Image (cartoon, rainbow, N blue to C red):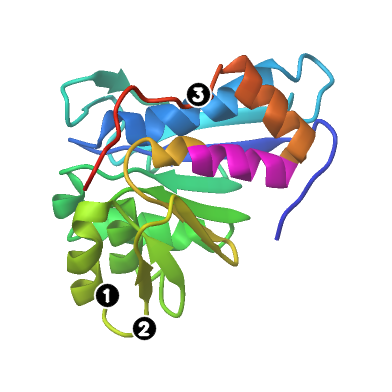
């Protein structure tokens, strides 16, 4: 369900863990906080807040070594409207972390949107949140996720992001920015998403062609 109102209170919870891929969540974090910034005091996203959450709270170290202090532990986490989990090498542990899977499952039940970037979709799958859905992940993990998820989940490749109902999954790393901009448009309107994108100077023109 998509809710679009002026200056509505909306909380985005980004769930972090040890060795999460930095750009997986920092990209969407920039999109959402920029959407709030360009709203000013009365714009559509002026009531938005982004909360960083981890199992124990405190400081979490990313896959590339970036250290971040989160806002809340699982026990302290507020009600969340949009849930986002990044990927990274740390997901190999989180897929088997009962506390993580239980937290995601319980929080997702009350969310408007459940989202992931990169191999974060594998953690959502382990939490039972992708059954009967179409999802995606990093190109290098597509075949593995297909094997692990079985026939109940359809894993798509060669796409930037996939929306299936309230579930929104993005491919690897930078694809999370595209996903977050699309979601900004869904919640706050396309014009506001375009303004956010312009403020970020997000107009990708990479110097090289990547062949994978």
Q: Residues within 10 Å of mark 2 (few under 14, many from 20)?
A: few
Could you say which is closer to the camera, residue 28 or residue 106? 28
Are circles 3 and 2 on residues that touch, CB within 8 Å? no
The residue identified by callout 2 is 152
Give percent across and percent down for residue 102: 34, 61
Give percent across and percent down for residue 160: 44, 50
Please, which residue is most extreme toward the bottom here? 151
Q: Residues within 10 Å of mark 3 (few under 14, many from 20)?
A: some
Are circles 2 and 1 on residues that touch, CB within 8 Å? yes
Residue 185 falls inside the magenta stretch:
yes
Say which label, 1 or 3, has the lower sequence index: 3
* Residue in the image at 80% along x and 15% along y: 41
Left or right: where 208 falls relative to 189 = left
What number of labels is visible? 3
Q: CA distance from mark 3 to mark 2?
A: 33 Å
In the picture, which quadrant includes the N terminus?
Answer: bottom right
Q: Residues within 10 Å of mark 1 (few under 14, many from 20)?
A: some
Q: What SS does tag 3 mark?
A: helix
Which disc is residue 30 wearing? 3
Could you say which is closer to the camera, residue 209 or residue 171? 209
In the image, residue 37 sits, relative to residue 174, either above or below, namely above
Left or right: where 152 falls relative to 82 = left
In the image, residue 204 sits, relative to residue 152, either above or below, namely above
Q: Quadrant of residue 110?
A: bottom right
In the image, residue 118 sits, relative to residue 149, either above or below, namely above
Magenta stretch, residue numbers: 178-187
Say which label, 3 or 2, has the lower sequence index: 3
* Residue in the image at 60% along x and 28% along y: 49
- Main SS class of the magenta portion in the image: helix
Q: CA distance from mark 2 to mark 1?
A: 7 Å
Which disc is residue 149 wearing? 1
């Amino acid at each position: 369900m998509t809710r679009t109102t002026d200056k509505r209170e909306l909380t985005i919870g980004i769930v972090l863990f040890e060795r999460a891929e930095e750009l997986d969540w920092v990209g969407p974090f920039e999109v959402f906080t920029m959407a709030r910034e360009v709203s000013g005091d009365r714009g559509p996203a002026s009531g938005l807040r982004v909360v960083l959450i981890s199992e124990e709270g405190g400081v979490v170290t990313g896959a590339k070594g970036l250290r971040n202090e989160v806002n809340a532990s699982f026990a302290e986490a507020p009600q969340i409207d949009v849930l986002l989990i990044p990927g990274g090498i740390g997901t190999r542990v989180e897929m088997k972390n009962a506390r993580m899977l239980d937290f995601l499952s319980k929080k997702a039940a009350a969310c408007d949107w459940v989202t992931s970037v990169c191999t974060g979709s594998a953690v959502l799958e382990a939490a039972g949140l992708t059954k009967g859905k179409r999802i995606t992940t990093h190109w290098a993990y597509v075949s593995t996720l297909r094997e692990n998820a079985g026939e109940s989940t359809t894993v798509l490749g060669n796409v930037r992001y996939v929306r299936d109902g309230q579930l929104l999954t993005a491919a690897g790393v930078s694809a999370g920015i595209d996903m977050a901009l699309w979601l900004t448009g869904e919640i706050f309107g396309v014009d506001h998403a375009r303004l956010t994108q312009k403020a970020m100077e997000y107009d990708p023109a990479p110097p090289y062609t990547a062949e994978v």
